[in-house]
Image: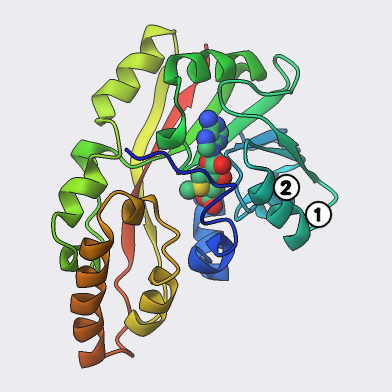
Amino acid sequence: MRRIDYDKEQYQDYARGRALTERQLQVWISAFGARLPARRPLTGLDVGSGTGRFTPALAEAFGPVTGVDPSVRMREVAQDRSSHPGVRYVAGAAEDMPVPSGSADYALMFLSWHHVQDKPRAARELARVLKPGGRLLLRANFRDHHPRPWWLEHFTRGFEVDASLYQPLHEVIAMFTADGWRVADFGTVTQPSDGTRGEVLERLRLRTLSFFAQISPEEVEAGFRRLEEFVAEDPGAPAPEFTDSLLTLERP
Ligand SMILES: C[S@@+](CC[C@H](N)C(=O)[O-])C[C@H]1O[C@@H](n2cnc3c(N)ncnc32)[C@H](O)[C@@H]1O
C-alpha cells in the first residue's frame, strides 16, 4: 500500500468527501452500542479519529472520548468542526498513545487499522490503554471479506487493488488472540444509502479514499470517465446501501 500522509493529502476534503448522513451515523452508533457494556458513562478512545467523523457522536452516546491521531491537519479539522465538551483530540498513534494504562472502556478504530505500520506494537498498546475486559471495535476491511462498492467496478483492477490494502481476517484475529485477546463478535453493519449516485460521484471526485492513491493517474482518469457515463444514465438513482465488517475484540 502506498502510505498516505494525511498532513499533505486528503485533509482539506476528507470531511466533505467522507461525510455521513445523520442516519448513517446513528446506525453506526447503535452498532457500537450493541457491542459495548450497557453502563454509562464509558470512557472511549477514537484511535485514528481523523476529522472527527465519529468522535462527538461517541461522546454524546457513551461518555468522554479522546481522539488520537498522528495527523496535525486532520486533528485541526476535527477541532474546528466540533467543540463537544466530552471530546479532546491528542497527537498520537495506535502504536503510541499518550493516555494512561487501563484508562479506557473501549477503543474504536474506524478504517485506521490498515494505516498502522507496526501492528503487533499497536495491539500491545491497545491492550495497555484499555481496562481488563475493555473492547476494541475494529471497523476494518479484510481482504477475504471485502465489500464491492457499486462504483469500484468502473476502475480497472479496482477490486483487487482495494482488497490488497487490507489484511485477511484470520491474520488479524491470529495476531490479537496470540496476545490473549478474545473475539467477542464478528459481523456486518448495513450502512444506509450514501444518497444518489450523482451525489456519491461528487464526493468521490474529492478522492478522499486511499484506493485512488494506489492506482496511476491514467487509471484514475479512465475510471472516472467510465463512472461518469454510468452515473449520467440515472444520476438521481439512490446509491445502494452497503454492508461493512465490524470485528469486536475483548482485551484479556
Ligand atoms: C481513513 S482515515 C479514518 C478517520 C476516521 N476514523 C474516520 O472514519 O473518518 C485514517 C486516519 O488514520 C490515521 N492514522 C494513520 N496512521 C495511524 C496510526 N498509526 N495510528 C492511528 N491512526 C493513524 C490518519 O492520520 C487518518 O486520520
Q: Are marks 2 and 1 in contact (CB under 8 Å)?
A: yes
Other residues around mark 2 within 10 Å, as few (<14) / some (14–19) / many (≥20): many
Task: Tell me: residue 21, above or below residue 44.
Answer: below
Can residue 173 be seen in the rendering of this structure? yes
- What is the number of the mark on residue 212? none
Report whether the residue tagged 2 is closer than 8 Å to ligand 1: no
The answer to whether residue 197 is left or right of residue 91 is: left
In percent of the image, x 25 and y 82: which residue is there?
228
Image coords of residue 15 (percent x, y): 58, 63
Closest to the observer: 16 or 66? 16
In percent of the image, x 20 and y 85: which residue is there?
229
Task: Tell me: residue 34, above or below residue 91.
Answer: below
Other residues around mark 1 within 10 Å, as few (<14) / some (14–19) / many (≥20): some
- Identified by mark 1, the residue type is His
Please tell me in which quadrant of the rendered image residue 42 appears.
top right
Image coords of residue 132 (percent x, y): 61, 14
- Identified by mark 2, the residue type is Ala
Element on which disc 1 rests: loop
Who comes first in sequence, dot 2 or dot 1?
2
Can residue 35 be seen in the rendering of this structure? no
In percent of the image, x 72 and y 33: which residue is there?
43
In percent of the image, x 32 and y 76: which residue is there?
239
The answer to whether residue 122 is left or right of residue 71 is: left
- Nearer the observer: mark 2 or 1; the answer is 1
Q: How far is disc 2 from disc 1 in space, using C-alphas? A: 8 Å
Closest to the observer: 63 or 91? 91
Q: Pick the quarter of the image with the N terminus.
A: top left
Image coords of residue 33 (percent x, y): 57, 44
Task: Tell me: residue 199, above or below residue 177.
Answer: below
- What is the number of the mark on residue 59? 2
The answer to whether residue 26 is left or right of residue 217 is: right
- What is the number of the mark on residue 84? 1
